[in-house]
Image (tube, rainbow, N blue to C red):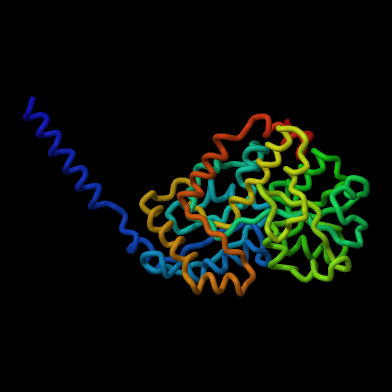
Amino acid sequence: MYKWIAALSTASTLLLSSAASNALDVEKHFKGKRITIVLGYGAGGTYGKTSLLLTEFLGKYIPGNPTLIKQHMPGAGGLKAANYAANAMPKNGNYLLMPPDMMVVSQILRPTKVKFNSKDFTWLGRVFGSNNLLVVRRDSGVTTFDEAKRKMVILGGTGKGSPTYIVPGLAKGLFGAKFKQVQGYKGSAGSRKAMEQGEVQGVALAWAAWKNGHPQWFEGGEKSFAVGILQSGFERDKDLPNIPLIRDLAKTPEEKAAADLIATNSLLGRGLALPPGAPKALVKPLRKAFWKTVNDPEFIKEAQRRRLPYLPLNGAEMQKTIEKLMTDMSPGAIKTARNAIFPSKK
C-alpha cells in the first residue's frame, strides 16, 4: 500500500513538473505579435479615443512588448462586437474587447438578442466610468425633464443595446416622457452630429462623451446650445448637481431598483476584457500591465490632454462587480425595466 502511495506521489510530482514546463511563456507568446482591441463604436467618441490611447501605452507594459491596434465593429449599440468577441474572436489573447457599458443590462433585459454571458469575459480593468446624461437642444422648447413629459422630443441613438436607447426608454416607460427615438447613428459622434444638424433634438450619452466632444454646447448659461435634463447613475455627477437622477424620480422600490439596474453602465465605463476561453495564464500579466498603464504619469497626462476622464478600476474589482451585478439583480427590477424600455418584449 505504501509503495502505491509513493508511486502516486512520484507520478503527481512528474505531472506537476510537466505542467510547469509546459506553462505559457507570456513574453515569448507576445514577442513580435500584434494585439487587436475590438470595439463596437466608431472612432470619434470616447470608446474610440480611449482605445487609441491604450494602444499607444499598453504594449510597453505587456511582456514581449507587442504592438497594439484597434478595430471598429459598430452595430446594435456595441452588441455586435460583444457577440463577436464571445463566439468568433480568437481566444489566444491577441484580441481584446472594449465592452459596451450596457453589456450587463442588455444581457439581462434582452437575453434573446445577446449571444454571450458577461461573467465569462475576464476583465483587465477600466480607465473610467461615467454617468449618462440626456441632453436636448435648447431650441427644442424643452429645458427640464418635466417639460419633456408634456412636449415631444426626437432623440437619436446608435441601437437598442446602447444607453442612447435604454436610458431615455426607461424614463419614457416609467414617467411618461414624450420621447420619439430614432436609432441607427454611428457612435456618439454620429449621434451628436445629427443633433447639431437638427435631424434630432437630443441624445443620451455618457457625460464624459459630452465633455470630450462638445463642451462648448453647455456654455453661455440660458443661451447655451444644449441643456442636460436627466442623468443615470447611482449618485449625481459632481459636474451636474442640479440635474435629477432617474432614481431620484422613482416612486416605488421597483422603479428605483430598475433605475439602479440601468445605472450599472456607469460602473463599467471604458475598459478592456479578454474573451471567454482565453488562456488563464495571461490574466495576471495582462491585468498587471493594464494597471501599470493607467497609472503611468504620461498616460494620465495624455488622457487629460484629450479630455478623457480618469477614474480607473482594476480588473479583479471589475470582475467582482460584474459577478455581483449578475447575481444580485432583483427579478422585480428586471421586470420593471424590461416592461418600461421594451414593452412588447416578454
Instruction: Identify which residue is drawn at 63% across, 32% down.
Output: 330
Instruction: Identify which residue is drawn at 88% across, 62% down.
Output: 138
Picture layout, residue 180 above or below residue 345: below
Question: x%, y% of residue 80?
Answer: 63, 50
Q: Quadrant of residue 222?
A: bottom right
Nearer-the-camera pick, 293 or 346: 293
Question: x%, y% of residue 250?
Answer: 76, 39
Picture layout, residue 186 above or below residue 170: below
Quadrant occupied by the N terminus: top left
Q: Quadrant of residue 338?
A: top right
Residue pushed farthest top? 1
Picture layout, residue 220 above or below residue 83: below
Instruction: Identify which residue is drawn at 65% across, 52% down.
Output: 78
Question: x%, y% of residue 181?
Answer: 82, 49
Left/right of residue 78 with respect to residue 37 in the rendered view? right
Quadrant occupied by the C terminus: top right
Nearer-the-camera pick, 60 or 247: 247
Q: Is residue 80 visible?
A: no
